[in-house]
Image: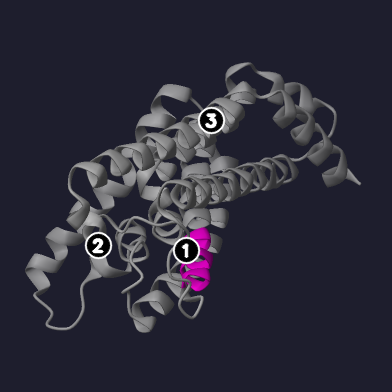
Amino acid sequence: MIMGNLLRLEFRKLKKQKSFYICTLVMVALLFLSALTTNVLLNESPDTAGQLNASGIGNLITALGNCSFLLIAGIFTALTVCEDYEQQTVKTIFARGYSRKSVYFSKLISVWLSTTIMFAVVELAAFAFGSFFFGVGDLGNFRFLGLVGAQYITCMANVTLFFAISSALRKNGSSIAATIVAPMLVSMVLSLVDSFLKLENFTLTSIWLSSFMTDLSALSVSSGRLTTCLVASLCYIPVFVFGGMYFNKKMEL
């Protein structure tokens, strides 16, 4: 009952949240510009079609990178999480008897739902634009569906990380900056560790989120690598969820 009330509150706010619509429209616009630019390049140099992977399926697989999905989703997550803290409305919610845990999870579910809708809109728009300009492309054995599924889980792992960071910092400016910098900073540290360890068949950077989306944006990715990205992302999600909840409890209102 408590979670139900909080979720209804979050969903009502989502319907009125301008950042949700703006971020989604920006990503769709970027996808259209990407497809239009590719079409112009193909008209000028038709022999580059293979290199540009021009098709509806090709656009679908590369959509998240072409529209900067993780960057924009990170900004949206930070704005959504920090809004109640910056406006101090969270104090009113707590004063009505709701616990930090309930507020945390209701907002997390709202962010997951919001970014899931964004993901679906982006993928559908990318496929539509690609099919309109270049045709559907080769469906093959429908392996692209597995890639899109793995991309979704990886995106949710990233969103959960952004949520945990924003729940701890609670300020728009610092949260947005952290969601952009933190994944890259972790990659740099892991690369440094890899350079010292010099392992032959394994690197720490290969199991960090930042490397997953690049690999999952190519149909040629191996089944083993796809599985690694999927399983690792699924493992990261509960770590970020409960890590964010821990730091959220430690912070003063």
Q: In this view, does 170 lie above or below 167?
A: above
Report the Cα–Cα distance between label 2 and label 3: 29 Å
Label 3 sits on residue? 25
Q: Is residue 198 above or below residue 16?
A: below
Label 1 sits on residue? 236
Bounds of the magenta span?
Answer: 144-153
- Where residue 228 sits, quadrant-wise, is bottom left
Q: Specify the quadrant that holds the C terminus.
A: top right
Tell whether label 3 touches label 2 (CB within 8 Å).
Answer: no
Q: Disc 1 or 3, which lies upstream in sequence?
A: 3
Q: Position of residue 203 (x, y in %)?
A: 20, 73
Mark closer to the observer (2, 3) = 2
Of all residues shown, which one is farthest toward the top? 87
Label 2 sits on residue? 50
- The residue depicted at 60 percent of the width and 30 percent of the height is 20
Q: In this view, does 38 lie to the left or right of 160?
A: left
Q: Where is residue 8 in the image (x, y as percent from the top left)?
A: 83, 37
Q: In this view, does 160 lie above or below 204?
A: above
Report the Cα–Cα distance between label 1 and label 3: 29 Å
Determine the secondary structure under disc 3. helix
- The residue depicted at 46 percent of the width and 41 percent of the height is 165
Tell whether label 1 touches label 2 (CB within 8 Å).
Answer: no
Report how many numbered discs are placed on residues in the image. Answer: 3
- Residue 189 magenta: no
- Residue type beneath disc 1: Tyr
Determine the secondary structure under disc 1. helix
